[in-house]
Amino acid sequence: MYGTNLFVADSFNGRIDEYTTSGATVNASLITGLTGDNLYGPQDIAVSGSNLFVTNYNFVSNGDIGAINEYTTSGATVKAPLVLSSTLGLRAIAVFGSDLFVTNWANGTIGEYTTSGETVNESLITVNDSSGGIVVVPVPEPSTALLLSESREDNVGSGPLRPSAHAEAKTRDRSCAFAQFA
């Protein structure tokens, strides 16, 4: 969400749509799935200022690998791809300062990248192999993170969160907690 607008990853149609919080369509094809846009099967979006960071299920022009692309909230391409993953399966994304945290259902990890496209740690945390959504929440020192998750085989709907693992998580100069959703 940016201002009063919602950005929606339309995986089936390979595009990013924009709506108001009251449900009115602003642009049903803000970012399209054309091959030139390097966007096919967007999974999730994180907003930082006026930029959108989008995870891709499949980066078509380079084969079956995952990608993170960066766009403006007006739909212009900043950098696509910003990050290429060595595996297919990038799903959910969260931004915290200048860091991006991304779940990868194919290898059961949460990776950390910078908003400028550098890989910090592709396997920062190991989780279950059906990781879904992710939220980063600042916590006061000391930085003990409680990872909350719910694994669902059908990946449909949501349910109550439950503690599944404890992990120490301290990113460069920041403490944060991860909450993972299926």
Image: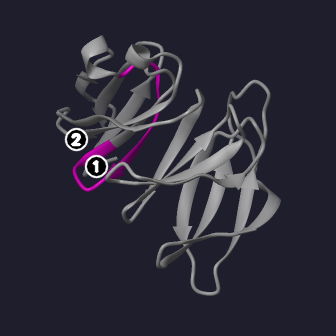
Read off the residue under disc 1: 2
Q: Dots 1 and 2: beta carbons under 8 Å?
A: yes
Q: Which numbered disc, 1 or 2, marks the residue closer to the eye? A: 2
Of 162 and 104, the residue lying toward us: 104
Q: Secondary structure at mark 1?
A: loop
Of 3 and 9, the residue lying toward us: 9
| Magenta stretch: dominant secondary structure | strand
Read off the residue under disc 2: 73
Local crowd at mark 2 within 10 Å, few (<14), some, or many (≥20)?
many
Q: Residue at x 31, y 43 (%)?
A: 52
Q: Position of residue 129 (x, y in %)?
A: 75, 37
For badge 1, the amino acid type reads: Tyr
Which quadrant of the figure contains the C terminus? top right
Q: Position of residue 153 (x, y in %)?
A: 79, 27
Q: Which residues are the magenta region? A: 39-52
Q: Position of residue 59 (x, y in %)?
A: 43, 22
* Left or right of residue 120: residue 52: left
For badge 2, the amino acid type reads: Thr
Q: Residue at x 60, y 30 (%)?
A: 89
